[in-house]
Image (cartoon, coloured by chain):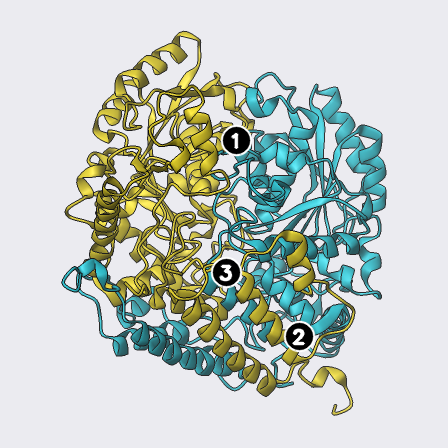
Chain colours: A yellow, B cyan
Amino acid sequence: MAEDPLSHPALDKAAGEEFLREAFQIILEEAVRKGTDVTEKVCDWRKPQDLQEILDLELRGSGEPQQRVLEHCRDVIHYSVKTCHPRFFNQLFSGLDPHALVGRMITETLNTSQYTYEIAPVFVLMEEVVLKKLRELIGWGSGDGIFCPGGSLSNIYAMNVARYQRFPDSKQTGIWALPRLAVFTSQECHYSVQKGAAFLGIGTDNIYLVGVDERGKMIPADLEKQINKAKSEGACPFFVNATCGTTVLGAFDPLADVADVCERHGAWFHVDAAWGGSALLSRRHRHLLRGIERADSVAWNPHKMLMTGLQCSAFLLRDSSGLLQRCHGANATYLFQTDKFYDVAYDTGDKTIQCGRKVDCLKLWLMWKANGTEGLEKRVDRAFEFTRYLAEEIKKREGFQLVIEPEFINLCFWFVPHSLRGKEGCADYWERLGKVSAGNAGSGVGGEPPFSDG
Amino acid sequence: MAEDPLSHPALDKAAGEEFLREAFQIILEEAVRKGTDVTEKVCDWRKPQDLQEILDLELRGSGEPQQRVLEHCRDVIHYSVKTCHPRFFNQLFSGLDPHALVGRMITETLNTSQYTYEIAPVFVLMEEVVLKKLRELIGWGSGDGIFCPGGSLSNIYAMNVARYQRFPDSKQTGIWALPRLAVFTSQECHYSVQKGAAFLGIGTDNIYLVGVDERGKMIPADLEKQINKAKSEGACPFFVNATCGTTVLGAFDPLADVADVCERHGAWFHVDAAWGGSALLSRRHRHLLRGIERADSVAWNPHKMLMTGLQCSAFLLRDSSGLLQRCHGANATYLFQTDKFYDVAYDTGDKTIQCGRKVDCLKLWLMWKANGTEGLEKRVDRAFEFTRYLAEEIKKREGFQLVIEPEFINLCFWFVPHSLRGKEGCADYWERLGKVSAGNAGSGVGGEPPFSDG
């Protein structure tokens, strides 16, 4: 068979390993070392047209030599924003945890799709251990859950599971015969509630926005008012979303009071703790989520404050009757055969609306192993301390103005330029001030950068 | 400030780098080298209870020493299934492309969330280049698209965009006032069509299953019949899903004929080419997808046959009017500000129902750069040749029986044990034969293993 091209491998193993080694060195030097070095730039900014010229993005008929491909690796890293940099203050995370990164690299190399125990034995068991740990921190002795590609999908899953629990037949019949379904959430909530209502066929008009207090927290009395309003309009109030850590102010809705209202009206109580959930790890700060154990479901993204890296988003349920599986399951026989030689309860892949699904548990598990619950707690506490420190600095510094005293790690402030100082009374003051930060995220402090130089 | 704990980094940079280096060595030896070595096991199989005992999965209060964490890395790799192994014949992929793997490792290290140009400059431009290339292979000179977390979500996106295009108000109002929406797909289609109909509130009862011929291809005349049936029942036939590469037989629906039917009835024409799309790269085999250029949308997963690694799933649209953005957009002002200092058309993150979104384009781009379109074409052609080779071997070999001549790279066969040979006439023959492969996937040939030893 020596002449048969099929009898030879298509790739040269040694060359492949050599490429991996060289590329790893580039990753280590350019992305890890420089990317976390406070004396380097967070971003070498270029306009789209200029960047298009610099990067040779075009895909051609012929392959390029290894050295050129390695140059591409360097360029991609160089012109990307260094989200691990101590001075990266854009959305939601910062810093680099080497254990989580190794978890991600192993995940990528093994390239497992987490359908079944037969294909993902280690990760099926590991996901369950990690989800159980997260549920324990919520205060649940049992329950269910799955890792999702992002907190938005976790929130949308919650809405769908709530609908299914109330109207199980709608999975087959659609929602035409159902009463108009009403969703309740505060005006400060994440926009995924809106996206979810649209996507699930419920419609954004059927979201009742609940008022918030001066700290951005949902007002339970207004929730009750809105629910009664919806009922009087013939709608079915099936789903309440409370937020732990709102996007802008970092507000925590009063969960226990919201739970009371949900109980009175038989509504599903979901907590979007995508951002704020990690405060549960802190004995000092977990009081912010008091009442979360009364939720029916929780969305919690360790890829935010805990620094596992994208994507690591847990959708957690209090239910342990198999509701999630019944809601999302399609029982595809080519994948989820029932005549296997092991307990097919370990085949968890049908709990999602995905088919192929990335392994999202290993990075969190490995990081947890290395740091322990106590190490993660310190990380969370440190982020709070940094925020407190920055708030005090802002108060001392001329031209800076705190919007509100932080209770979480969001810190909202104004920078008032010289030309506007002392002109708070002017008619166009707020309009002009608003333009100062145009184009900047500028209003949040992300997770802490442990590789920081100080 | 020397005494202030906040003035010190939480992690030791040098120790972090050392850990990365040691872990990379383990990944290279255990996952890459052994994982692709034909003389090593694909899987060191253990029952769930036994594996639970072997792996020390529990998460504790205290962190574990680095050497112990590295042992965990070894164990995780050792007991995981080696999807890169030449003898891995479970679902949908196999082999290891070192360029794609490097793309994944850079992605993980940079940890970019692909919302906006400001946070993901390189990847916003790169995603567009890659999607454009995929669209060109479909035969579209313009269009739109986005990478999704898997082909199921791409298919579900298609269904939602089709609904929105027909009934744009339903995004706000929900679907109560709409006529009953009817979905058409063959009985051989992927189960995500079912999951999507349930999730979007349409309901699985409103899926009309279209008959297939002896090769598993949709019968266009039956599609027309089903559409007319739905119309006569007062339903609105808004969405037709055709499949390129069905899950079991690898069948390609006759796209041009299906397109004719869709045009006559004004239905959205979606092609689920998650599995079969990569045949477009082969000049010899792309005829299988003749007519795909007439689709309104296409799902195509390079993570399957092209070996980019999970997840790499493109959702592609012929529309270039911004339909996708209008359908999924929520215009969250904290993220998608309109007063930025660059053209915000580059801020593509609002085209999805996700918020944070992993970078999925780099692995494909880097692999394409290294191999060229011609290299990828060879990879696809080789997979076809392997399948052809295996089909001929099966015909020669006693006790093996081909279910159907393959036209794609799925190969379905029976293994007939001695006890059943020559007993095709017995009443319980098929029942007994079916039990032979119980618990085995056994009926598909995945992508080709380029690191194979022969």
The alpha-carbon separation of the residues under discs 3 and 1 comes to 26 Å
Tags 3 and 1 on a common chain: yes
For disc 2, the neighbor class at 10 Å (few under 14, some 14 to 19, many from 20) is: some
Q: Nearer the viewer, mark 2 or mark 3?
A: 3
Q: Is residue B448 shown above or below A299?
A: below
Query: What residue is disc 3 on?
Result: A113
Q: Residue at x 25, y 27 (%)?
A: A259
Labels 2 and 3 touching (C-beta < 8 A):
no
The chain ID associated with circle 1 is: A
Query: What residue is disc 2 on?
Result: B399
x, y percent for residue A125: 34, 61
Is the N terminus of chain A in the top left, top right, bottom left or bottom right quadrant? bottom right
x, y percent for residue A63: 73, 74
**As shown in the figure, which amino acid type bears the numbered disc 2?**
Gly
The alpha-carbon separation of the residues under discs 1 and 2 comes to 50 Å
Secondary structure of the residue carrying numbered label 2: loop
Label placed on residue A200? 1
Q: Is residue B147 shown above or below A318?
A: below
Q: Nearer the viewer, residue B390 or B325?
A: B325
